[in-house]
Image (cartoon, grey):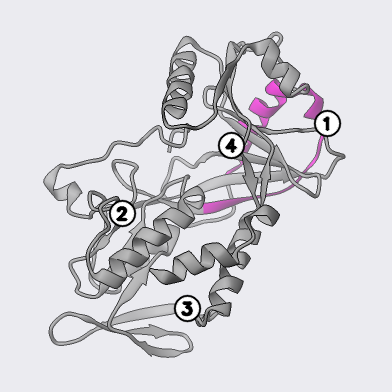
């Protein structure tokens, strides 16, 4: 518990987070209804959010196409304090802060098995670098969670998919914000190095491959070129697929498991990175006290057996 509070003090978020503003585009009447609902929900919770006309959205992001498109732009929501965080910087920031607080981080160490004693409790983790004995084990292995949990005899209601992404060659600063479009399905921002960072959709088939799929990225690039004709001649540098784990109701699992001493944090789909600080705090609480925090109490494995699902299929504004 105290560890995560200390980490929050040690981490320097100003270095990692770039507030540029986030535009969510609306191309259909349904988009407008959903976006307006988001604006009112944000305001009701004290979060600044506003609705822009197509012309106002173009004024905020001058390279945005508001002319002749397959799905014309009807407007957009804007969250001015929203932005991007460098994933690698956040990961290394947590690692350095944890190391400074005495946490042992073992890199390049593959988990090969989970040992249970005669009573069925966790007693050790087998790795490629030896055995680590422990009475409590927390698993947060993202897309490979089901593989790790199977070592302890626990089956989870998870599917793993590659989520596609790609980056362009670097160009001078030209893109002032983050733009997302659900209807055309595009996500784009510009990195500090000048690359355009483009998010595509998930592959339709379960897989652990990280090569990416050409038809997925092709669809994303067609959407980007439609929204931003200025970028049509840019060359792409690299593409990849990151593995995400998805539950049937698209909500995470942060819970104890049927195995005493074994805990799991998984099922975040495409939205896990943003939830890292909060979910880590709840996970630490659950492990330390052997009971869930009131916030994550409903997010159990048993909800899929008992029918108490938490439908969040549209939480990330993409079909994941």
Please check the rendered image and state whether residue 233 is part of the magenta-colored stretch, yes or no: yes
**Which residue carries the number 1 mark?**
233
Q: Residue at x 40, y 49 (%)?
A: 268
Q: Residues within 10 Å of mark 4 (few under 14, many from 20)?
A: few
Tell me which numbered mark, 1 or 4, is placed earlier along the sequence: 4
- Mark 4 → mark 2, Cα distance in angstroms: 31 Å
Res 138 quadrant in image? bottom left
Are the residues flagged by discs 1 and 4 in contact, CB closer than 8 Å?
no
**Which residue carries the number 3 mark?**
110
Query: Is 40 rendered above or below residue 2?
Result: above
Query: Is 70 rendered above or below residue 103?
Result: above
Q: Residue at x 47, y 45 (%)?
A: 271
Residue furthest to the right in view is 172
Give residue 253's mark: 2
Res 151 quadrant in image? bottom left
Is 309 left, or right, of 195 in this rendering? left
Work out whether residue 232 can be spotted: no
């Amino acid at each position: 518990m105290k560890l995560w509070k200390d980490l929050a003090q040690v981490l320097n978020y100003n270095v990692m987070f770039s507030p540029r503003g986030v535009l969510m585009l609306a191309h259909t009447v349904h988009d407008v209804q959903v976006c307006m609902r988001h604006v009112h929900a944000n305001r009701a919770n004290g979060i600044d959010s506003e609705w822009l006309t197509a012309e106002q959205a173009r004024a905020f992001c001058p390279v945005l196409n508001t002319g002749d498109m397959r799905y014309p732009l009807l407007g957009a929501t804007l969250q001015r304090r929203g932005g991007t965080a460098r994933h690698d910087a956040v990961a290394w920031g947590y690692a350095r802060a944890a190391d400074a607080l005495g946490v042992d981080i073992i890199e390049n160490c593959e988990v090969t098995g989970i040992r249970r004693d005669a009573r069925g409790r966790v007693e050790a983790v087998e790795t490629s670098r030896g055995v680590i004995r422990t009475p409590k084990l927390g698993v947060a292995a993202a897309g490979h969670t089901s593989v790790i949990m199977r070592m302890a005899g626990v089956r989870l209601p998870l599917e793993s998919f590659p989520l596609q992404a790609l980056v362009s060659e670097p160009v001078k600063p030209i893109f002032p914000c983050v733009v997302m479009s659900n209807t055309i399905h595009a996500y784009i921002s510009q990195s500090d190095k000048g690359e355009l960072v483009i998010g595509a959709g998930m592959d339709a088939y379960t897989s652990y491959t990280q090569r990416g799929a050409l038809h997925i990225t092709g669809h994303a690039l067609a959407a980007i070129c439609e929204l931003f004709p200025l970028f049509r001649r840019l060359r792409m540098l690299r593409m990849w697929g990151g593995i995400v784990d998805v539950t049937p109701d698209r909500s995470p699992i942060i819970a104890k498991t049927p195995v005493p001493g074994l805990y799991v944090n998984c099922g975040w789909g495409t939205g896990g990175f943003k939830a890292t600080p909060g979910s880590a705090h709840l996970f630490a609480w659950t492990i330390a006290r052997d009971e869930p925090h009131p916030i994550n109490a409903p997010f159990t494995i048993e909800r899929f057996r008992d029918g108490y699902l938490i439908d969040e299929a549209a939480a990330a504004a993409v079909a994941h």
